[in-house]
Image (cartoon, coloured by chain):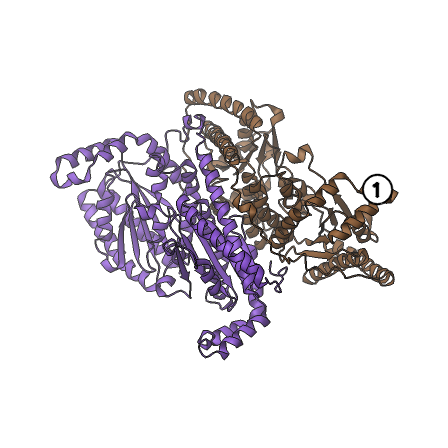
Chain colours: A brown, B purple
């Protein structure tokens, strides 16, 4: 895509004065419209050093409402960032709906200098292409408009600009040894950039190569492209809303996807441990986990433990036993409730990207990103299209964690409907347990069958080799507690053997 | 995804008799509805040998209208198929809109036995994952419903079934040495299958693992899934139609994406060759191409040459010179006109998959798959959504060709508007040229500016390292003819050096 580019392109001053202010006005009203329509805008700037990324961004934001945009300058990752999957720092910086995020350099660093300078392995930057495509697809599916610019100048032009900066006593600091080294590697970067453009140009997030020799030309092209893409995004949103108004035919709903006996019907709920065996096993695995905690810290492996299950399935007590022997600095328990206003303004996985454990630490989720496939699906808090898409989104999310080296254990805390009733009643009678039972629990219980369908779909379609589900026989709490502890210990041990 | 599967699942006879005929009736009316709504259905069967793929297919089609479906039994590729990109034989077998195609084994052979038995290189089967995902995404974007079944039985069950078949004198032929060898490799295939399921489960084409120990269970689950997916596909179609009714806002249309002078304005149309130099150069490169023709035949490299350009841009005469010295058995000139009824009933790239040259041969396209980005876009023969998607689809198509080793040259035959007028007039006056000029050419000429926008987008977004565009300075026919010949020779020589 770079070969065809005519770097001699320029725009006369008169023409620029005619076009540019008009484009800025259009951009201004676009910002307002996108805000109202809750369509987020993502603008990425990559390109040669001194190609004018910074000044282009200045031109874009010049007349925009500062409450509506945020500029992110992306440098080499700091330690906090290195200790998490590479997209972590970008997911957390995605804009809320209706707002604009502009990236001065971006996630593409991974396939440009991090690749060329060998900061990452070949496997890592190769994987990054797919991770990036999935990242951008997920955001676009959620309605985001993504515009990506590569600011292109020739090697000769770059040298000219560098020399000019160096000669200026106020600007000389901007060009250091590293910049000159990259300049010398221009041809290498050229090839790598070509590959990047080809592998990540998609219909939902296409690249625009900007001939940046002439500033005026570049600014007009950039604003033009943003305005055009924004207007298209608004149209897409309107079309999407029209589509949502079409009610599904009844036919599909009548079908039961899962025929009894299901995998859940067959869970052996008679499994139990008497108190003596329980005490023994429990401390054995708790001690073991404590020991493993040090091991994973040393080699910087993160551990993700997900608890999902029926109400009163024993998640809370189970988590207590899981963490009992652990150093509180090494783990975090993350309770997941309904999303906040801020969280709702982002992609549904955004809040979970924010909660990824640092390498060497545990994150234990009391409910999780599976909300979309369970409560949000059953209660209609998201559209059918959204939850259907979520199977793949969630698998991709967990694959990101896995690619980074994370151990992932997911527990479905299972119990019989009868035992749930017994526990509900117990909660109502015992004073210090009463807070645990709410009207909602009773309502959920009435929808047991619908939830069961959702759970079965979830187990079937999100159990992967890298993030398998364990269905925990939860009728007996003793049994369940030892079962989860042992599963986590085993998973960590398997992972340690590989590293 | 295989781990969670409960292979003990079964369905009682009574239950089956209650459910199955009802499902068959539903499938029958689904077939009719999908036919009417022009939604194609693709059903893929993979799974262990003797897991019951064949009988499941029999059950599906039992009550269907035979005009509406076709069953494809996919075996190891024959020579014709090996001489083309691996998806060729599957693209050509995609169903027309409203019809059903059922595949007994499929494109997944590539990542199963062709991988395990090392018929293809690691690079090839790894690439295949992405090629397959793109293939299925393109079909789904075009409205197809894709249902994929993996028929799962245990190693023990497989052995039992093999032995039973062997003991039956009428059936024994079905199990040969190769089947037993695969049986012994069960664990290896299990792992490879897991990977396949994970890498190719998408929201547009999810896998369904069928517990196939019990036939009744399997049949009910399969029909259930097809009916459910079909109904969803019908809903999707209705939503899509509602979305199409939303008219785009005028805003985006007002913008000129390409600012003059464009890459086309700057083409040096003064370039020419006098007749003497032309004759010399022409025969030099024609002779060279003849020589290269033998070379590529020997090493089985296919060559694709695409001609696009303004009306009267000189495509016809240029092609004549390209092929003048070639052995007619080695090339095919493919003129592309408006799609036929049959072609319209398929994905827009279907007819081009049908026209892929055999390894070692040339295919020369007089107009091509770029119709979607040119005439179909400008004349409104496809929706905006469709042509916007086509940039990526076409790049993916060409990447498939490239991955297979194809040399791809694409020519945009350029000339000035003035020269076009001269040629139009000449055509009107000279008797034997008169057939070349039609009303349509004049109409197209009036839309020059719109076409120019489309051409610029096309050049910008579909010029890749593996399939670059060459803008041919076509004002002088002599020059243009030597230019294209030389470009093809150079590209072939570069490719030969690499192999």
Question: At which x and y percent is residue B408?
Answer: 36, 51
State left or right for residue A204 relative to residue A87. left
State left or right for residue B331 relative to residue A192. left
Question: Image quarter for residue B70?
Answer: bottom left
State left or right for residue A342 relative to residue B128. right
- Pick whichever, A182 or A268, lies toward us: A268
The residue pinned by badge 1 equals: A434
Q: Is residue B362 above or below residue A41?
A: below
Q: Residues within 10 Å of mark 1 (few under 14, many from 20)?
A: some
* Residue B38 appears anywhere in the view: yes
Question: At which x and y percent is residue A187?
Answer: 48, 46
- Pick whichever, A287 or A474, lies toward us: A474
Question: Image quarter for residue B325?
Answer: bottom left
Quarter of the image that includes the N terminus of chain B: bottom right
Question: At which x and y percent is residue A66?
Answer: 61, 24
- In the image, what residue occupies the spot 30% across and 31% down? B448
Q: Chain for mark 1?
A: A
Question: At which x and y percent is residue A180?
Answer: 55, 41
* Residue B265 appears anywhere in the view: no
- Pick whichever, B42 or A27, lies toward us: B42
- In the image, what residue occupies the spot 81% across and 57% down? A478
């Amino acid at each position: 895509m770079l070969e065809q580019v005519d770097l001699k392109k320029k725009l006369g001053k008169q023409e620029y004065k005619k076009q540019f202010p008009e484009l800025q006005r259009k951009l201004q009203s676009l910002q307002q419209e996108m805000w109202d329509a809750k369509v987020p805008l993502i603008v990425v700037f990559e390109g040669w050093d001194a190609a004018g990324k910074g000044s282009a961004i200045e031109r874009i934001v010049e007349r925009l409402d500062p409450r509506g945009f945020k500029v992110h300058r992306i440098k080499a990752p700091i330690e906090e960032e290195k200790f998490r999957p590479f997209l972590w720092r970008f997911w957390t910086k995605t804009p809320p709906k209706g707002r604009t995020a502009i990236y001065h350099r971006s996630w593409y660093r991974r396939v440009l200098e991090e690749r060329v300078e060998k900061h990452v392995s070949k496997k890592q930057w190769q994987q990054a292409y797919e991770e990036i495509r999935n990242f951008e697809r997920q955001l676009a599916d959620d309605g985001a408009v993504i515009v990506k610019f590569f600011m292109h100048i020739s090697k000769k032009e770059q040298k000219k600009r560098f020399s000019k900066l160096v000669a200026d006593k106020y600007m000389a600091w901007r060009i250091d040894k590293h910049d000159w080294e990259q300049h010398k590697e221009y041809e290498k970067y050229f090839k790598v950039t070509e590959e990047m453009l080809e592998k990540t140009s998609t219909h939902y997030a296409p690249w625009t190569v900007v001939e940046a020799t002439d500033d005026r030309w570049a600014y007009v092209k950039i604003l033009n492209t943003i305005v055009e893409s924004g207007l298209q995004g608004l149209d897409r949103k309107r079309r999407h809303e029209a589509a949502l108004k079409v009610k599904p035919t009844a036919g599909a709903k009548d079908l039961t996807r899962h025929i009894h006996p299901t995998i859940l019907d067959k869970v052996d709920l008679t499994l139990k441990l008497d108190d003596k065996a329980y005490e023994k096993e429990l401390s054995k695995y708790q001690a073991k986990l404590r020991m493993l905690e040090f091991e994973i810290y040393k080699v910087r492996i993160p551990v993700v433990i997900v608890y999902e299950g029926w109400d009163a399935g024993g998640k809370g007590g189970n988590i207590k036993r899981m963490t009992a022997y652990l150093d509180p600095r090494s783990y975090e328990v993350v309770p997941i409730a309904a999303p906040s206003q801020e969280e709702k303004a982002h992609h549904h996985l955004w809040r979970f990207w924010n909660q990824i454990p640092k390498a060497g630490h545990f994150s234990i989720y009391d409910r999780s990103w599976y909300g979309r496939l369970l409560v949000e699906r059953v209660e209609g808090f998201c559209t059918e299209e959204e939850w259907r898409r979520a199977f793949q989104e969630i698998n991709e999310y967990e694959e990101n964690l896995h690619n980074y080296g994370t151990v992932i254990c997911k527990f479905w805390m299972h119990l019989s409907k009868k035992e749930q009733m017994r526990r509900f009643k117990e909660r109502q009678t015992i004073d210090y347990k009463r807070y645990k039972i709410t009207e909602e629990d009773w309502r959920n219980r009435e929808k047991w069958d619908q939830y069961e369908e959702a759970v079965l779909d979830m187990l079937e379609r999100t159990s992967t080799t890298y993030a398998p589900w364990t269905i925990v026989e939860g009728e007996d709490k003793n049994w369940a507690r030892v079962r989860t502890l042992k599963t986590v210990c085993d998973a960590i041990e398997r992972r340690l053997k590989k590293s």
